[in-house]
Image (cartoon, grey):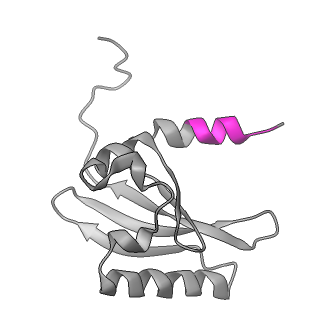
Amino acid sequence: MDLSPFFKSIVESDTAAVVVCDLSHNIIYMNPAAKQRYAKSGGGKLVGRSLMDCHGEQSQKRITEVVSWFKSSDSHNRVFTFHNAKENKDVYMIALRGENGELIGYYEKHEYRNAETVKLYNMGG
């Protein structure tokens, strides 16, 4: 069974921004939340551009270090990179690996810390 449409649907419906990059740091995918979040920087037009163009020199250096660490072992898969106090979230870089464990890219993962305010099982308008 091809799980691709299921995984794509999961990422597309996530309310957290997901930006996927290849090993050359090219942005190859942004989910709708990422396009909206980074709209002032170009939104969906960032796909195909280098992630490095969106970061300063210090951040570029850190991104390069993390990718090198990911490459050094297939057990190196997650790095905490930033806490955003204003949005109460942690940001991580996550390794993406192929079927044989080889590093094929990475993505940025946002984990929000605020408690949900919607009522349980609220399904209506």
Q: In the displayed structure, does residue 116 sit left or right of residue 4?
A: left
**What range of the chain is rendered magenta?**
2-9
Q: Residue at x 82, y 69 (%)?
A: 100
Q: In the displayed structure, does residue 74 sit left or right of residue 40?
A: right
Q: Position of residue 8 (x, y in %)?
A: 60, 40
Between 117 and 5, the residue placed more toward the observer is: 5
- How many marks the image carries: the answer is 0
Q: Residue at x 68, y 35 (%)?
A: 5
Q: In the displayed structure, does residue 52 sit left or right of residue 83?
A: right
- Image vertical order of residue 21 relative to residue 125, above or below: below
Asked if residue 16 lies in the magenta stretch, the reply is: no
Q: Quadrant of the N terminus?
A: top right
Q: Position of residue 119 (x, y in %)?
A: 28, 25
Q: Residue at x 31, y 87 (%)?
A: 58
Asked if residue 6 lies in the magenta stretch, the reply is: yes
Q: Quadrant of residue 121?
A: top left
Main SS of residues in magenta: helix
Q: Position of residue 114 (x, y in %)?
A: 25, 49
- Image vertical order of residue 103 relative to residue 108, above or below: below
Q: Residue at x 51, y 58 (%)?
A: 48
- Image vertical order of residue 92 relative to residue 59, above or below: above
Q: Position of residue 77 (x, y in %)?
A: 59, 73
Q: Quadrant of the C terminus?
A: top left
Residue 16 shows in the view: no
Residue 116 shows in the view: yes
Q: In the displayed structure, does residue 36 sit left or right of residue 109?
A: left
- Image vertical order of residue 75 relative to residue 37, above or below: below
